[in-house]
Each structure stands twice: as structure tokens, then as C-alpha cells.
Image (spheres, rainbow, N blue to C red):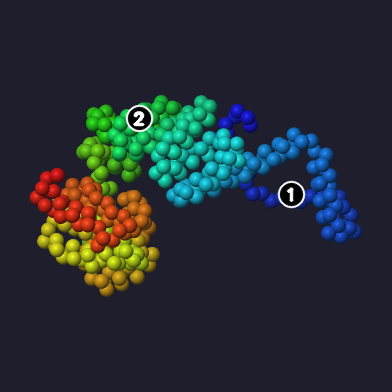
Amino acid sequence: MLGVSILLVNPFRPQLDTPPTRVLSSAISPPMRMCRLALGIVLALAVTPSPIRGQVQAVDRLKASADELDQGQLLLQHREYYEALKRLTRANQLAGNRCVECTLSMAEAMQGMKAYQNVLDTAQRAIELAEGSQSVLARAHRLRGLAFQALGEKDPAKYRDAETAFRAALGSDSDPESRIEDDLHFNLGVVLLKLGRDEDGVAELKRQIETRSDSMADAARAMIANPRRARENYAPDFSIVSSAGETISLDALHGKVVLLDFWASWCAPCVQALPSIQKMQKAHAADPFVMVAFSADRDEIAWRRFTVKNAMVWPQYWDRTGGLQHRFGVRAIPTYVLLDREGIERVRVTGTGFNQSRSLSDAIEKQLSPRGSRD
């Protein structure tokens, strides 16, 4: 395996063992048969040449590596990034730290953990192991592009690095059946819009929607219509039916200041903050201000009883599957997200009750002021 990278797939699936050939007399007791069989194995191993034993051990390591890779990728699909990374790292170690698929998957787990510098280093390692594989190069360059794009939120100069990485990925993806190319046109288009190159960015987004009809294509159409969406932190679109039967969507809330409250009835800080939220709701009942609560409760009946008992009369929604939490990137509750009149996220507070967050109250007042409506 020296000097050779490993693109690992798992050929080792559980199979029924083949019964051993019967060479011992039926008159011999079962325990004696086992003793003799064990002795035979020991003697066989004793006379087996060392190179063959080494090959057997290498095969065992690859089997174990493939099993760890399978488990790691399964955890990755469930967004259990930390546990996935542990499994994938172990898989790579068992493969002599030359497993290309392990390395790419490790970079994906790091991306989920927002460890962007680690993504850059690990994806670069995958590029070094690619040995000319165009699909590997496309995936690795795209991961680097995504990491640079994320880093660009604090350092806009990184957007140029992201553009370079996405173009390198497009140059590597030669598979006509690949969906990566479609995603890359979207990724590149967004970065170009962030760089203020709207005409080039829109052209890339149009190439993406030619072959896609999913949520990513919808996002591309929204940015084509309004390139500012790539530069401003617009909230993701949503449409829900509240517990009172009212349909509420982001479009319908346009022109109002919106506070999204991600909470649960079993969350102590959420419950402690409730009086302050009720006070805020009453104070701005006549203003262009709307609160919408998304509950992470596991039990619908408990959620409904709590909202009725505590007179939570503003729109309530049971986020049963956690879909809205995922869409808004909510990882802990309570989380409060304040949107301005255009639907742009202005403030986010996580892990602190509304009653303890002075900055959130000030931000609401600012957005409701005449000056805030012009900012």
C-alpha cells in the first residue's frame, strides 16, 4: 500500500460462514474436536510465512476501515458531525491515512462543525491523494470553496479564494451525469454576487436553474430577481399554518418587524422569559410588529396545553420534525431571530432568555423607529 491512495468502498458484507469439512470421527466428543481444530489452526499459523500473515492483517485492517467508513458516513447523513468525524478519522488511520473517501468525508464533517480552517487543510489533503481522479478533485475543491465562502463573512477577501476554488472544481468535474456541476454554478454565482459582480453571478445562477427544480433553484431565482439576497442575510422562505389555523409566510410578513422565537415548554430559560415576551407583545400590539413562535416540543398535547394555559395569543407553530430549526440554523433553544421589514436578519440571540437580553429589546425598538425603517 506504500505510495498508493485508497478510494475505499466496503466489499466486506456479513455472510454466512461455510461449514468446515468433517474430517474428525463422529466418535470423538465435540470438545475434543474443538481442541484439535484449534491446535490445527495454531500449527498452521506457526508454519505460515510471515508475508502471508502480513497480507491477512492488511486485509483485516481494510475491512475494519471500510466498516468504520460506512458508520461514519451514516452518522454524517444524520448530521452527527462530531461522532462521524471520530469514525472517519479511525477509518482513515486503519487505511494508512491514505483513504480518499475517508478524507473527503472528514472534510464534510468538519464543514458541518463549522471548523472551516480544518476543512481547507483536509480537503487539500484529499487533492494530494486524488491521483488525477476528477470526481475527487471536484468534491475537494468545492469543499474548499464552501469553507472560503463561510470565512468570507468576516473577511470578504476570502470570497476571491472561494471563486478560485469553485472554478477549479468546475474545471475538474467532467462527469456529464454529475449533480456537483449544478451545485457549483450556484455556489460560484452566490460568491460572484457577494463580490458585487451581479451580471456574472446571475449568469451562473441561470445555468444552475436550467437543470434543477428544487429548493436550491428557488433560491437561485430569488437572487436573480434581487441580487442583494446574496449580500444581505435574508431569512429563508417559509410558510406555516399556526395552531389557530392561520397561514403565515415570510412574504406575507413583508413590511413588518418580525421576532421569531424558537422555544419549548420544557426549556427553563424559555419559560422564565415568557413574562417579558408577553409584555413586549402587548406593548407593540398596535405597531407593525409580529412575533411567531416555533416550538421544539416533543409532545403536541403538552405544547398546546402550555400555550393555552399561558395565554400565548401570538402565532404558535409546532415544529414537529425540526425542519424550521434546521432551515434557520438553530442549534440550541431559546433562540430569538429578529427580522427587519425586508426580511433581513438583524439580530440573533441564542441560549439567553429574552428577559436577559437587553440588546434584543434595543434592536426591536430601533427597527420599529422611523429611522430603523429606512436603514
- Neighbour tally class for label 1: few under 14, some 14-19, many 20 plus, Cα within 10 Å: few
- Quadrant position of residue 184: top left
* Residue that lies at the very extreme toward the bottom in this rendered image: 309
* Residue that lies at the very extreme toward the left in this rendered image: 370
Look at the numbered disc 1 and give the secondary structure of its residue: loop
Q: Which residue matches tag 1?
A: 18
Q: Is residue 224 visible?
A: yes
| Quadrant into which the N terminus falls | top right
> Which residue occupies 27% across, 69% down?
307
Name the amino acid type tagged 1.
Answer: Thr
Q: In terms of depth relative to the viewer, which is nearer, 232 or 352?
A: 352
Image coordinates for residue 308, horizontal then vertical, percent: 26, 71
- Which label's residue is closer to the chain start, 2 or 1? 1
Name the amino acid type tagged 2.
Answer: Asp
- Quadrant position of residue 160: top left
Image coordinates for residue 133, horizontal then vertical, percent: 51, 28
Look at the numbered disc 2 and give the secondary structure of its residue: helix
Q: Which residue matches tag 2?
A: 161
- Is 170 on the left-hand or right-hand side of 362? right
Image coordinates for residue 255, horizontal then vertical, percent: 15, 50
- Neighbour tally class for label 2: few under 14, some 14-19, many 20 plus, Cα within 10 Å: many
Q: Is residue 306 above or below residue 113?
A: below
From the viewer's perspective, is the residue at label 2 or at label 1 nearer? 2
Task: Compute the Cα span from label 2 to label 1.
Answer: 56 Å
> Which residue occupies 36% across, 53% down?
331
Number of marks present in the image shown:
2
Image coordinates for residue 87, horizontal then vertical, percent: 54, 46
- Is 5 on the left-hand or right-hand side of 302? right
